[in-house]
Image: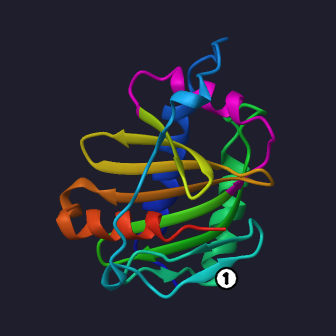
Amino acid sequence: MIKNNYFYFISFCLFILSGFCCNKVADTNNENISKIKIMQFNVDEKYINEQIKIEEINIYFSAPKNLILMDTVSFNKIQSDLEKKVNILPNTYKLNLLNIFYDEKISFFCIISKIMTENFDEIKKIFNENNKLKSDEFIYNDFKVFQILYTNENILNFKLLFNDTKNLFEIDYIIPKQNYNEEIARRIESSIGSIKK
């Protein structure tokens, strides 16, 4: 069971969410989908775990190497606490946590969530309004992907929102800056590259 980083993790999630969603959603025009680039990721099997299927969103995925699936007791506690504490999210951006993978030794988390809305453009507006975030949009394995990098003096969060014809889902890779290095970058890239229908 995860112990040492539990309250750190909850506090971090609340901080990240408040940073993302504190601004008003603006009315902006949709970007021209024809201009979105097609992205490729280098996948090195030594940097990822065995492939699994996430049934709730019907994708195949490999977590970064050395991240383990959080036990049910810890997962349920985190999910329950977040549901009680997070009341800052707009109605257009509600998440259902599906899986949490982690490496407690270096506080490295990978979180998979289902986005409980059908309006991908509204979700993008929420993030585009926050000028503290770096974002990009691309196509990968027939997914439309909106990528956000959130960083402060302590944390890096690579957030990817996937738009499938049947599902909207989100994958977060979160790690303290002091623990981020080239190997971690390769683990994240290989994990993203493993995502497929």
Q: Quadrant of the C terminus?
A: bottom right
27 shown above or below 46: above
**In the rendered image, which quarter is residue 193 located in?**
bottom left
Q: To which residue does mark 1 refer? A: 72
* Number of residue marks: 1
Furthest-front residue in this view: 34
Q: Position of residue 157 (x, y in %)?
A: 40, 50
Residue lying at 18% horizontally and 63% vertically, measured from the top left: 181
Q: Position of residue 124 (x, y in %)?
A: 61, 31
Residue neighbourhood size for the residue with mark 1, other residues' Cα within 10 Å, grouped as few (<14), some (14–19), many (≥20): few
The residue closer to the viewer here, 184 or 15, is 184
Q: Is residue 89 left or right of residue 154?
A: right
The residue closer to the viewer here, 131 or 182, is 182
175 shown above or below 15: below
The residue closer to the viewer here, 93 or 166, is 166
Q: Position of residue 187 (x, y in %)?
A: 33, 71
**In the rendered image, which quarter is residue 176 located in?**
bottom left
* Residue 80 magenta-highlighted: no
Indicate the colouring scheme.
Answer: rainbow
The residue closer to the viewer here, 71 or 191, is 191
Of the residues shown, which amino acid type is indicated by label 1? Thr
Residue lying at 38% horizontally and 77% vertically, measured from the top left: 104
Q: Is residue 75 left or right of residue 43?
A: right
Q: Position of residue 162 (x, y in %)?
A: 62, 50
108 shown above or below 140: below
Element on which disc 1 rests? helix
Find the magenta span and give its range.
114-134
**In the rendered image, which quarter is residue 190 located in?**
bottom left
Residue lying at 47% horizontally and 60% vertically, measured from the top left: 9
